[in-house]
């Protein structure tokens, strides 16, 4: 029913546009009911700010209330728990580190599902195990709510500029309702199929990203050892068949590019811990489906070792520094 209502609201908006401008603005305002946002970290905070910028009132919570300070200053309402968010909003976005946090926020003692209203649309943008997304969808359905997975590609910069790519899995009839919110935070919103398929796409992308980054880092390291100037080597790679995102947009060698984590002692960006987590998800899903991922498995081990050797909080491109230190 909520889906129908949401759908009909969108249809009305389109119709109104052609007949009565004053009426349109009233309806638009009416569609901008509060949106709940849980998990105001590196990504969640700029994403929620973009909802506010688009005129959606935001009701936020985070286990570390100080994470909500920036949003509070911009006019968001901050509450104490996911359950309280669910009492006040019928569209909720979650942006949490990993599967256990998502399970806790949805099904824990103060979780969303304790107070969720029937018809609520729940969108999880965390990168987690697709099987957990499916479990959350079943639990949400029991309460009369709808759960969709919508993990993102693009880092903190893309989140700030509303340039994220969302990979969406879930009931197709709800996709338009999800898209209405996701387009405020992203440049691309792609429907991938049933619930969990957004996570599947995200995990595949990040496995390739990790393999590409390690490949770029070891190539650059070898070239430097062979006496090549790193800027020159990067320029040649980027006009040749070795070019990839890690070489031309996010080069891991300090001094090659400006405005990337390697230019700032690998601060900010996408942490090695999160990359190790995503590779662990790739490993689990590959094991479950008996799929060979030899390079993905090796990348997982490399990031795990990095995390235990002081790189956990550095950007994942610090694999260059890690390899350089290996004599
Ligand atoms: P983060 O650790 O900066 O933020 C997560 C936030 O969730 C934190 O503020 C934390 O306090 C909060 N949180 C944790 N458990 C909670 C709970 N039980 N209740 C309420 N709040 C809770 O992580 P991030 O960098 O924002 O990443 C979030 C997700 O997005 C991860 O799954 C990550 O893999 C994915 N992602 C990150 C990037 C990136 O560049 N950082 C890019 C793409 C995808």
Image: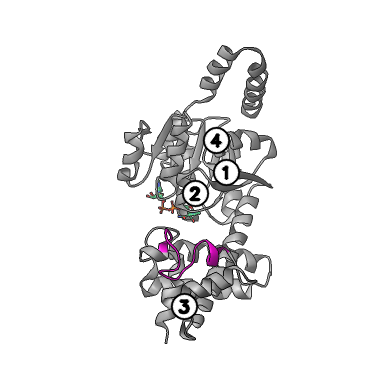
Of the numbered discs 1 and 2, the one sitting upstream in the chain is: 2
Relative placement, left or right, of 3 versus 41 is: right
Marks 2 and 4, how far apart at CA: 16 Å
Marks 1 and 4, how far apart at CA: 12 Å
Q: Are marks 1 and 2 in contact (CB under 8 Å)?
A: yes
Query: Observer-nearest residue: 326 or 127?
Result: 326
Q: Is residue 258 magenta?
A: yes
Say which residue label 2 marks.
158
Say which residue label 1 marks.
187
Write down the region rendered in magenta.
Answer: 245-261
How far from the left and from the top, in percent, is residue 16? 64, 16
Marks 3 and 1, how far apart at CA: 36 Å
Relative placement, left or right, of 192 versus 69 is: right
Mark 2 is surrounded, within 10 Å at the Cα level, by few (under 14), some (14 to 19) or many (20 or more) other residues, namely some
Residue occupying image coordinates x 49% and y 63%: 250
Say which residue label 3 marks.
229
Say which residue label 4 marks.
181
């Amino acid at each position: 029913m909520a889906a129908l209502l949401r759908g009909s609201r969108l249809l009305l908006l389109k119709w109104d546009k052609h007949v009565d401008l004053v009426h349109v603005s009233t309806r638009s305002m009416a569609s901008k009911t509060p949106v709940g946002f849980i998990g105001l970290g590196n990504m969640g905070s700029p994403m929620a700010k973009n909802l506010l910028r688009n005129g959606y009132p935001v009701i936020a919570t985070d286990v570390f209330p100080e994470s909500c300070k920036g949003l509070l200053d911009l006019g968001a309402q901050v509450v104490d728990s996911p359950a309280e968010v669910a009492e006040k909003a019928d569209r909720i976005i979650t942006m949490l580190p990993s599967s256990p946090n998502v399970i806790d926020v949805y099904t824990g003692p103060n979780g969303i599902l304790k107070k969720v209203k029937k018809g609520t649309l729940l969108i999880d943008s965390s990168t987690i195990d697709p099987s957990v997304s499916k479990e959350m969808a079943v639990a949400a359905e029991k309460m009369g709510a709808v759960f969709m997975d919508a993990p993102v590609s693009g880092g903190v910069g893309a989140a700030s500029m509303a340039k994220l790519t969302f990979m969406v899995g879930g009931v197709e009839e709800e996709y338009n309702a999800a898209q209405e919110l996701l387009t405020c935070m992203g440049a691309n919103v792609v429907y991938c199929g049933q619930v969990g398929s957004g996570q599947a796409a995200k995990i595949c992308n990040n496995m390739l990203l990790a393999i590409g980054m390690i490949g770029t880092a070891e190539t650059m390291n070898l070239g430097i050892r062979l006496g090549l100037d790193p800027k020159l080597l990067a320029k040649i790679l980027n006009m040749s068949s070795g070019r990839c995102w890690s070489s031309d947009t996010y080069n891991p060698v300090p001094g090659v590019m400006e405005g990337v984590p390697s230019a700032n002692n690998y601060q900010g960006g996408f942490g090695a811990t999160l990359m190790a987590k995503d590779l662990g998800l790739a490993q689990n899903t590959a094991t479950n489906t008996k799929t060979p991922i030899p390079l993905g498995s090796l990348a997982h081990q490399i990031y795990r070792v990095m995390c235990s050797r002081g790189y956990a909080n550095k950007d994942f491109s610090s694999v260059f520094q890690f390899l350089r230190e290996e004599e």
